[in-house]
Amino acid sequence: RELTMVNETQHTCSASSSSKSDGGSSSGSESSKDSSRCSTPVLDAERHERLREKMRRRQDSGDRWFSLEFFPPRTANAAVNLISRFDRMGAGGPLFIDVTWHPAGDPGSDKETSSMIIANTAVNYCGLETILHMTCCNQTKDDITGHLQKAKRLGLKNIMALRGDPAGEEWEEEVDGFNYAVDLVKHIRNEFDDYFDICVAGYPKGHPEAESYEADLKHLKEKVLAGADFIITQLFFRSETFLKFMKDCQAIGITCPIIPGIFPIQGYHSLRQLVKLSKLEVPQEIKDVIEPIKDNDAAIRNYGIELAVSMCRELLDSGVVHGLHFYTLNREVATTEVLKRLGLWKEDPRRPLPWAVSAHPKRRVEDVRPIFWASRPKSYIYRTQEWDDFPNGRWGNSSSPAFGELKDYYLFYLKSKSPREELLKMWGEELTGEESVFEVFTCYITGEPNKNGHKVTCMPWNDDPLATETNLLKEQLEKVNRRGILTINSQPNINGKPSTDPIVGWGPSGGYVFQKAYLEFFTSSEIVTALLKVLKKYESRVNYHIVNVKGQNITNAPDLQPNAVTWGIFPGREIIQPTVVDPVSFLSWKDEAFALWIEQWAKLYEEESPSRMIIQYIHDNYYLVNLVDNDFPLENCLWQVVDDTFELLNSPAQ
Amino acid sequence: RELTMVNETQHTCSASSSSKSDGGSSSGSESSKDSSRCSTPVLDAERHERLREKMRRRQDSGDRWFSLEFFPPRTANAAVNLISRFDRMGAGGPLFIDVTWHPAGDPGSDKETSSMIIANTAVNYCGLETILHMTCCNQTKDDITGHLQKAKRLGLKNIMALRGDPAGEEWEEEVDGFNYAVDLVKHIRNEFDDYFDICVAGYPKGHPEAESYEADLKHLKEKVLAGADFIITQLFFRSETFLKFMKDCQAIGITCPIIPGIFPIQGYHSLRQLVKLSKLEVPQEIKDVIEPIKDNDAAIRNYGIELAVSMCRELLDSGVVHGLHFYTLNREVATTEVLKRLGLWKEDPRRPLPWAVSAHPKRRVEDVRPIFWASRPKSYIYRTQEWDDFPNGRWGNSSSPAFGELKDYYLFYLKSKSPREELLKMWGEELTGEESVFEVFTCYITGEPNKNGHKVTCMPWNDDPLATETNLLKEQLEKVNRRGILTINSQPNINGKPSTDPIVGWGPSGGYVFQKAYLEFFTSSEIVTALLKVLKKYESRVNYHIVNVKGQNITNAPDLQPNAVTWGIFPGREIIQPTVVDPVSFLSWKDEAFALWIEQWAKLYEEESPSRMIIQYIHDNYYLVNLVDNDFPLENCLWQVVDDTFELLNSPAQ
């Protein structure tokens, strides 16, 4: 599937359709809506730019970039893994990724392995600028329009327009059909105006089916004239091949960006297959190296890395190449290694906002979220995907938009990456009481192995090990979890650290970030009763929300207003307050947080088993509590609140 | 005019009209609009309440309150003085003021002395909850509806519905006309639903024209049944009179608030006139005291104060009186003294926001303003009066709403309170050069007399002496003004002072307030040239906007975004950022700031006179500069910027 673009044929036939069928909300109405509401401070200029603008900006500034190509996996499990890979490789800072179109795999469907859904997940849940490939041959105009409308609705903004492989051996042009990529380019521009950025394929050696190299260049120019914004090339083995091609393109007036496609050789068989499909010839000097080591995968991969690095260096040194596109074959190691050696892999610990942004255009203005989903950002995005508008500036009418229903635990990208057996090892094959649950929480915090020798690296509410920031609170967290304050979310107070702070910093440099101390936990009704007495002493300093699974809700929050718990002050900008404790959305989070006890933990055990009943008991009887210490310049008083609570519980009067 | 309600007659005749003529935007559409935009944090719950709700809240909490009655003045100068009085007496915390209706004075007109415009100014420019009196007899239904529509359009929310004095001696009821206050109450409810809070008059001794005390009570009940929300009484001389009246009202089922009207005797003649008009009898014990001292104004006023204080104490001690309404006769001393002795005068140095809020309903959500108009809030309100929507949360699309044209220097409430001769003494009978202008600025800062021995207590940009907060910067301001950095606005940096701080605090208690250091000044192009060189060293730490009268604009502000320069963090709330340096509105402020040189200063001198030409030269050639130091936790660097600039100017290379 990664080879989809290999056999594409181009032609000059024009098949423009005239009727507009602009699926979702038009970009026109979107922009007018934008202008009528509060503006969002431009913290991250790129977030508001189209891909072609980002490319232009990087070219102007001389910042070199890379992009990554993936193909849709065959199984749901593979899709979960691919999405983790998106997150990991996204950390290196690709300008975009692209997802190939696999006509045989129902690519436009809602299946979790379809091209459409994989691209959707990359954009919406991984926050990656994404190009969706699309092929047009053997498809009706309506099918194609439907795919494009769906892509737009899902927030996809970039299409790689390809012909695709003809169905039969002997292929004939269809009159008024989509015979060539240029037809698809024209169709997209006709039906969707300038909504999509369009990419087309270039062939440094000429397309194998083209009459000649020169004829192929002309076809490429026609695709650009029809509205393509940039070109990604087929792979090649020598930098001269690309540089000559680029010069030839420029000579005939192609001025848009041309991005070389880089294929790090990763194995003997994949290379052979690729060569066969693409009808490319592997240069003799490469064959000479590979053939003798063809059974040594590691050796071939190392050679492939060396080869790619040196070719990329030549391309970048030429001065005409600003970005490199990698055919990853869905693998991480080789590409990551090449990028690291080239110095293009830039893991920037600083974040534009303290949570992972989504790349859906309608979420461009999103700049505030409730703190509750801090460890489950994909769930938050999922549950708010139907919102038309995103709270910006202020959290605003959190009461009006309803959170999506809580039914999709099976959502593939929300699945735990660990299989049942591993979870049982971490969380206990057999629970003996509430205390064994306390122990699991404590082990997760400390990182120490549990009594069976297994480390607890995830929890139903946290799929990843403890965040660096939470580590600041480790000692106290351990203490309270041992005593049945089962923490699932927390942050320390911060009184004006530089925005470049490696642990708590976010946003542009030169700013200052602040936090109010936050603590969220499950605990028994006995502890809650004592806690409420203690909280009277802290009135106005500490805001609290305490709720059980039935929704009995105790709070001292004034007028259901949100409490800003993270904010930043930056040079020349308005104040950003990206996380809030919002009383209304807390009740939606409550449903999710309680349900995770059952869905992720209780269901690991047999029905009616003692272990399952212990979790069920906690689910039915414990309270979910959140506490905010409003006096951020002082020492965090929340630990004192908890200490006071236990002191009260242990006092003779009790 | 303060006696308008004295002679009112009530009756039960009903004259309800059926057609709705709801002038301005309906309150329905307003509220739906509210719900579609970002919510404003409720910093000051009362700001969102109707008058009757405020009254109820005070009654429930046991907080006693007072209100003040004024009449419209005869001349524009008197109006300017009355509005200053509103500001001064507003500082004592009245729950509301009311403005009487003077039928002979064209009360609904746009004249600066009309009841309508005085009430409008009180609401919009002084931020006072205001009741506009309105009489109905001898007026057509259309006239009355027109007045009410206009009142609503101007943001007035409360009407005191009165009959008014019949035109002729012998008065006859008009069929279908407005014969009694109850007709007006019904008309208001019919035409404007629940938009207005309606007040009616009560007569503790019975209305002089009523058949009997009992009949008068019945009329009062009819007014309440027709839709009146509360009652203010005619004046009386003994607390028993009011307490009996109140009991009688309750006995016949009048349950709404009844507010005693208090008349502190302030002079022999005003008392006699009042008694004559209201047909009230002054008790003998009062006459006995007053007659012997009738030529001693001070003695009578002191007696009046004593008398009012003791009667008010009796009323408040009764437990049934929660608020007191004062007939001020537009005078300050007696009422203020009574209120202070009663402990009702509450000058709260803490402000809900760091600028004076307006009481117009559409400005209830206003929570951010550009810092430029800090000393000219009435001008800001005037120039934004046509805005439909107020930036809240974020400053937002400051570029879209246009500022009102700059033409109304003569606007009565923007006039300097000082006459021309005084201004000349302060600002110089004769200027000898730019340095004499520097001296004026310096004297304003220091508070020292100028070389002719006159203190400079106001400037064209500041009608009041230096703010307490600015005093923190006095020493440095003096230094730079001497050298031609002519400052008109500044604030120190503040890194988290308690919101209760008496100088820089604002908003609810328990919070922390912050500021970025700000400096705004006029200066010569020579200094600007050096300043720009110096600012290169401070890039990103210091944001600047530099503009001359022609609009040549030099700035390093990113993307024309506003820079938050004052913000506050409060328990359980979102962050409030009430002042910003906004690049777009700075250009509107620039027009006003430059024009004030000419309108307020140059025009004091003869045309072609050297003094006038000096001011004209400055107007034509100086730049208006604003500087923000973004590093609020560090020591303010703006003084260093200015020092560096002078050092550069004095260096040999220059």
Image (cartoon, coloured by chain):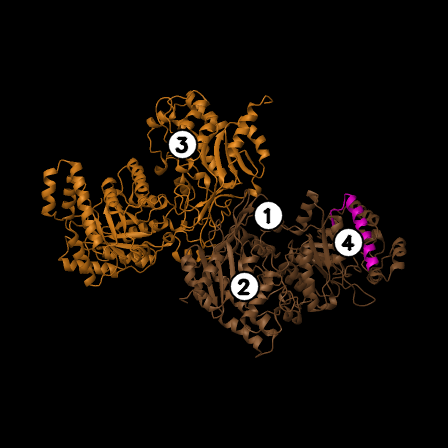
Chain colours: A orange, B brown
Q: Quadrant of residue A433?
A: top left
Provide the secondary structure element on which disc 1 rests: loop
Give the chain letter at badge 2: B
Alpha carbons under labels 4 and 1: distance apart: 36 Å
Q: From the top left corner, tell me how far across and down residue A365 is, in percent.
A: 43, 51
Q: From the top left corner, tell me how far across and down residue B178 is, in percent.
A: 74, 62
Provide the secondary structure element on which disc 3 rests: loop
Upstream in sequence: badge 4 or badge 2: 4
Identify the residue position indicated by label 2 in the image. Answer: B481
Cβ–Cβ under 8 Å for marks 1 and 3: no
Upstream in sequence: badge 4 or badge 1: 4
Count the marks.
Answer: 4
**Does the image show residue A204?**
no
Indicate which label's residue lies in the foreground, 1 or 3.
1
Q: Amino acid at mark 4?
A: Gly
Q: Residues within 10 Å of mark 3 (few under 14, many from 20)?
A: some
Q: Against B56, is B403 above or below? A: below
Identify the residue position indicated by label 4 in the image. Answer: B261
Give the chain letter at badge 4: B
Cβ–Cβ under 8 Å for marks 4 and 1: no
Identify the residue position indicated by label 3 in the image. Answer: A460
Magenta residue span: B298-324
